[in-house]
Image (spheres, helix red, strand yellow):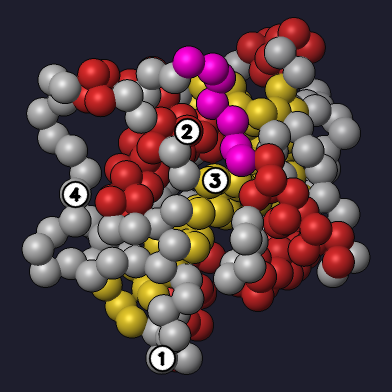
């Protein structure tokens, strides 16, 4: 991070005097369903509850990793990540959902994105010399865990938006055709930008929740394949989070 860029910034993320350091490895959850499950699960096993804005934060028993969230949308997710980094996080995994705009992706597929395109308003505030992207070594270690568990994973480009209800069919088709975008979410590109700017390792696990590439929208949020896949994927991430990126 260049200090000259930050010289005129008024507010910086910081660790408060009474705040504890976090473990280096952590999971940032977008949605309340997975976040509630993880916080409850860790606290049942002796995890420590802590404060994170209007979100939630739990440190696992043994202090080996943390889970944070919910954090829906680029601004909230970026603000949460900034605080987590200020408290000591160095490797963060985003766990969320995405809509498929490539016909190669179906509801229930697991996407470990390798590229990011920004349609949200947060990334532009984090100037970078090269396009924002996840840590590929970190991503590869997560991919290996899925393959070791006989889970098929996909790679590709994700475009993030602030306006879910303004996704235009022709615009998405153009993103897929010209920019080779495979899926859309609300947080990924912004978190890539923050992670690159702050020089930490970052990767994402996104479960395809709906299909946007057909003649009509195909939601799959309550389908068996989506619910079963995201539960198993979350278990794999939690089981391996201590070792990813080492």
| Residue 9, position as x, y percentages in the image | 16, 25
Q: Nearer the viewer, residue 64 or 30?
A: 64
Of mark 1 and mark 3, the one earlier in the sequence is: 1
State which region is magenta: 129-135
Q: In what element is the residue under mark 3?
A: strand
The residue beneath circle 2 is 196
Label number found at residue 46: 1
Residue 65 visible in the snapshot: yes
Label 1 crowd (10 A; few <14 / some 14-19 / many >=20): few
Quadrant of the rendered image containing residue 36:
bottom left
- Residue at mark 1 to residue at mark 3: CA–CA distance: 27 Å
Q: Residue at x 71, y 64 (%)?
A: 233
Lower sequence index among marks 4 and 3: 4
Circles 2 and 3 in contact, beta carbons < 8 Å: yes
Q: Is residue 168 magenta?
A: no
Query: In whole angstroms, how far apart are the C-alphas of marks 4 and 3?
Result: 20 Å
- Report which residue position mark 4 lands on: 14
């Amino acid at each position: 991070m260049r200090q000259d860029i930050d010289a005129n910034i008024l507010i910086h993320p910081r660790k408060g005097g009474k705040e504890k350091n976090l473990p280096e490895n952590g999971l940032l959850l977008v949605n309340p369903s997975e976040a509630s499950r993880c916080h409850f699960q860790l606290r049942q096993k002796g995890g420590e509850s802590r404060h994170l804005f209007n979100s939630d934060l739990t440190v696992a028993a043994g202090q080996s990793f943390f889970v944070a969230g919910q954090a829906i949308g680029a601004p909230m997710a970026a603000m949460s990540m900034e605080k987590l980094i200020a408290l000591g996080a160095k490797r963060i995994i985003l766990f969320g959902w995405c809509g498929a705009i490539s016909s190669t992706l179906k509801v229930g597929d697991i996407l470990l994105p390798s590229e990011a395109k920004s349609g949200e308003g947060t990334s532009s505030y984090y100037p970078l010399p090269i396009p924002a992207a996840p840590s590929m070594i970190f991503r590869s270690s997560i991919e290996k865990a899925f393959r070791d568990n006989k889970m098929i994973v996909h790679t590709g480009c994700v475009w993030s938006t602030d306006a879910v209800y303004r996704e235009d069919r022709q615009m998405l088709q153009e993103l897929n055709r010209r920019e080779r975008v495979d899926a859309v979410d609300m947080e990924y590109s912004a978190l890539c930008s923050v992670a690159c700017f702050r020089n930490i390792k970052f990767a994402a696990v996104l479960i395809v929740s709906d299909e946007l590439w057909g003649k009509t929208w195909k939601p799959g949020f309550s389908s068996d394949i989506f619910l079963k896949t995201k539960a198993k994927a979350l278990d794999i991430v939690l089981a391996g989070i201590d070792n990813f990126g080492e």
